[in-house]
Image (cartoon, grey):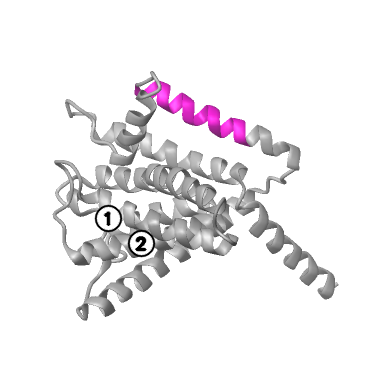
Amino acid sequence: MAVSTTIERRTDRHLYHRVSRTGTYGFLSALPLILMYEMLVVFANQDALTQVRVGAEVWLKQLFALIGSAGLATFGAAVLIVGFAIFWYERKRQIPLRPRFFLWMILESAVYAVLVAVIVSGLVGAILTIAVTGAGVGTLQNVASMDLSLKLALSIGAGIYEELLFRVILVGGLYLLVRRIAPGRRIAYAIAAIVGAIIFSWVHYLGPYGDVFTIGSFLFRFFFGLVLNFIFLLRGFGIAAWTHALYDVMLVVGFLG
């Protein structure tokens, strides 16, 4: 009996590791984040003339507008249509849907979020030979004066839309492009991850709402993006999105301060 139970657990873990990387689990695990983000944005902006939203979401809408469509409803519908299309397509692979796997994905992401804070801050501190913490050079420099509800909304929104833009579209696209000329998958992974991390860090300083450039913040975002890139490439969109969102939420509530 004990041997049988051990085998079943190993099989379960192997199945979880395989299916949690799929588009099906990525899409379904992202739905609660999208719902929480939209609810918090509406609540936090209820007295404002214009809504404050995540920059990556705005950029995605602008990209979407280039093909002749714009607006929150149209963009949201497109995201859902693509997500359900992926879900329907992957049903052919008979991917089992296990509710406990979604909980495992959140727990795995929470572990990664803490490890990202410790490892990335340590790397930046070692390079600069000074003590650098995530709160000092993290991804939310411009929201310090905002209400907590809006901070939480932007934290969750960053997990969804920055991962969709920078990981799925940018890094995923770079990987497919480099894979055509790279001699192996690992080299393609590395090139896509590094180039994507540079771009991810650089864009945070663009535009009128961009942060003031410092070498510490640039390095932090580069390593932060690099780790998320590898999480996305190795573990899929869902875990990358939850890792990013949980990291930002932990930062906002002071857990990583």
Q: Is residue 98 magenta?
A: no
Looking at the image, residue 184 sits to the left or right of residue 244; the answer is right
Q: Is residue 214 above or below residue 159?
A: below
**Which stretch is magenta?**
71-86
Q: Which residue is mark 2?
A: 224
- The residues tagged by marks 2 and 1 sit, at their Cα atoms, a distance apart of 9 Å
Quarter of the figure that contains the N terminus: bottom right
Quarter of the figure with residue 154: top left
Helix, strand or loop at label 1? It is loop
Q: Kindly identify the amino acid type of the residue bearing the numbered disc 1.
A: Thr
* Along the viewing direction, whichever of 24 and 106 lies nearer the viewer: 24
Quarter of the figure with residue 214: bottom left
Who's the residue at 77% across and 71% down the image?
6
Residue 133, position in %: x, y? 25, 70
Q: 10 Å neighbourhood of mark 2: few (<14), some, or many (≥20)?
A: many
Looking at the image, residue 44 sits to the left or right of residue 236; the answer is left
Q: Is residue 74 magenta?
A: yes
Any mark on residue 179, and which?
none
Specify which label sits upstream in the sequence, 2 or 1: 1
Q: Which residue is mark 1?
A: 139
